[in-house]
Image: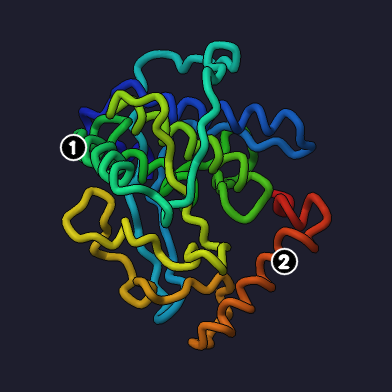
Amino acid sequence: MGNMREKGRDHLPSLCLVILLIALSITAGVHAAPITIPDLTKCEIATASSVGGPPITLPFNCCLPLTSTPIKDFSFEKYKPKRKLIRRPAHTASEEYIAKYNKAYELMRALPDSDPRSLKTQADIHCSFCNGGYNQAGVSGDIPLQVHFSWLFLPWHRWYLYFHERILASLIGDPGFTLLVWNWDDQINGGNVVPEMFTRNNTAIYDPKRNVAIQPPALVPLSATTNNTDRAVIINENLNNMYQSIVTASTATLFMGGAY
């Protein structure tokens, strides 16, 4: 497909994009089978397949903005935290914090799509690295850079969320701002439903396309094989799922993910 980026999007990429690429270098240095950084000038049309229902594959153009200047190395020394920030459960957020949260995303949504900090580009970062937008450079064959289904999942997404969070904080001028956590494995205190703050119409964090079947008060099943609608059964299956994923997953491969 070649370079599918749109003209006029040759802007300096956000620190988020920079650090995602650097994160691959850092994590690759401690593994026997390193994952190489992609060539951002060679972007393909990404694809995603349906999980359920009739089989369908959808194409997406989620190519990222390019930079006309060299990418700078990230420095841990330069970005040492000045305070401890705590991400709290979304279902316990105060109205004041919900308002701040919506304001941050309102400002992010208002940015033009060509801005690397925009919600569009932030979504494209996840899309392109999850759905085959880029291949690994310097390896034989067309091997996509895939950040799911292996040990790369956790470190990549932690970098991604951190810098997404820092962009939001900078937009509202609050260095203490943090993302909220959907505590979906909490089967006791109300974390196992979609947080109410995300169900409010006409807010910056509302998604009108979200599946109506999982709106509150529906419990969120953590297993894709859960078909039961009984709340007690779902809760029990969720607890079993988390126990097997966290407690009995006693090896690095079981807990962190398999080989790439």
Q: Which disc, if any, is residue 83?
A: none
On the image, which quarter does residue 196 sit in?
bottom left
Q: Which residue is drawn at 42% across and 57% down?
A: 91
Can the viewer see residue 138 in this picture? yes
Residue 163 placement (x, y as % from top left): 45, 31
Q: Is residue 181 left or right of residue 136?
A: left
Tell me the quarter of the image containing the N terminus. Answer: top left
Which one is in front, 42 or 211? Answer: 211
Which residue appears at 54% of the width and 43% of the height?
A: 157
Secondary element at tag 2: helix
- Are the residues at dot 1 and dot 2 in contact (C-beta closer than 8 Å)? no
Residue 14 image-quadrant placement: top left
- For marks 1 and 2, the one nearer the N-term is 1
Which residue is located at x 24 percent, y 39 percent?
103
Query: Disc 1 and disc 2: Cα gap in Å?
Result: 42 Å
* Mark 1, secondary structure of its residue: helix
Query: What residue does disc 2 label?
Result: 243
Q: In this view, does 250 lie to the left or right of 88?
A: right
Figure disc tally = 2
Q: What residue type is labelled 1?
A: Ala
Which amino acid type is marked by label 2? Answer: Tyr
